[in-house]
Image (cartoon, coloured by chain):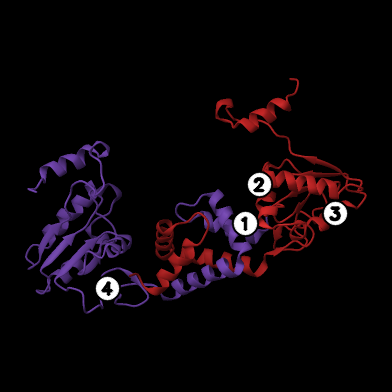
Chain colours: A purple, B red
Amino acid sequence: MAGIEIEALIKSLSKLPGLGPRSARRIALALIKRRETLLEPLAQTLEAAARTVKVCSTCGNFDSVDPCVICSDARRDDAVICVVEDVADVWALERTGAFRGRYHVTGGLLSPLDGIGPGDLKIEKLAARASDPKVKEVILALSATVDGQTTAHYIAERLQGTSAAVSGLAQGMPIGGELDYLDDGTISAALKARRPI
Amino acid sequence: MAGIEIEALIKSLSKLPGLGPRSARRIALALIKRRETLLEPLAQTLEAAARTVKVCSTCGNFDSVDPCVICSDARRDDAVICVVEDVADVWALERTGAFRGRYHVTGGLLSPLDGIGPGDLKIEKLAARASDPKVKEVILALSATVDGQTTAHYIAERLQGTSAAVSGLAQGMPIGGELDYLDDGTISAALKARRPI
């Protein structure tokens, strides 16, 4: 109906996460109408990302350089490694500015039901990094789900014998959370981990 | 935080209509992770669209060929021209399959407040097309808004003296619409245009 090149563009846009056929059509039309300000910059940044972005061979983050800017930043603390399941979590933690150590991306969570075992994740690599005596703490910033907690226990066991202490994120009320909107599990965890004020 | 090429990609994605920084980050990460199945096809379709898509010099539709496939389709009816304000409306009408005539895209609506006059729209071009004696009807499929109706009246007047009858879309209840959720204007219009069953 709209020319095969436009149809092909709509089809590849509609495969992006969160976009359906309606938003893909809307974006395709905007791209065609604003070729110089929208389409060409996007084509160039895509091409540059495809050409330069690689996986950091130390931590598993994505960057244009290897090791990534976080791994090669001399101002960051070598004594703490924060373990996350996905690069998106590295970005989320970096946005907070609350963590100044190093990262390690496992690439997923253990999930016996989905057939994901320790060999599918970068856990041996983490164990090798954590065996360096200058690493004092490994923070497991994994999902508060069954798979996340299974993975955390597996990693904690695997790191026994290293000099690193293993910790996990606190569980409790989210900032701005209202008690009657929270699920039972979060309320129970927050109550159990209560602290003096 | 995530390498300048990734940041640039997120920035150009977040300029697309309907995408905020959060969805742009999510899409950027998916593109990087699935380079062969997602990033490269998108880069290729963008490049092909930028290279081939042009405005049809007859009707104003976007296509890889000029005249567009609709204008050059011999099976379509030359006697009816459907006037729309945007290429998105051509696509919407084509999806219904309910119209088999030709199109004319005005490129917008008259809007004295925004300084958009008849010279800014492709109305003279429409008048020239409608003056062909084989054109029997011009359907004004414009928005049911003040600007849309102003534009419809202007075009109807401009086409006086041609052999084409000018019509507009019916106003009434949308299919599946429930009376108590409809606005007063639609209910009034549907009541006024009531018909025997």
Q: Which residue is mark 3?
A: B127
Q: Quadrant of residue A63?
A: bottom left
Q: Which residue is mark 2?
A: B92
What residue is drawn where x is 12% and y is 65%? A137
Q: Are marks 3 and 2 on the same chain?
A: yes
What residue is drawn where x is 26% and y is 47%? A176
Please indicate, yes or no, whether residue B175 appears anywhere in the rendered image. no
* SS type, badge 4: loop
Please indicate, yes or no, whether residue B83 appears anywhere in the rendered image. yes
Q: Are marks 3 and 1 on the same chain?
A: no
Residue B59 as seen in the image, left or right of residue A67 = right
Residue A14 lies, with reference to residue B51, above or below; the image says above
From mark 3 to mark 4, how far is it between C-alphas? 63 Å
Residue A70 is marked as 4
| Marks 1,4: beta carbons within 8 A | no
From mark 1 to mark 4, how far is it between C-alphas? 40 Å
Q: Residues within 10 Å of mark 3 (few under 14, many from 20)?
A: some
Q: What's the residue type where badge 4 is placed?
A: Ile
Q: Which residue is mark 1?
A: A7
Q: Residues within 10 Å of mark 2 (few under 14, many from 20)?
A: few
**For the residues carrying marks 1 and 4, which lies nearer the camera in this image?**
4
From mark 3 to mark 1, how far is it between C-alphas? 31 Å
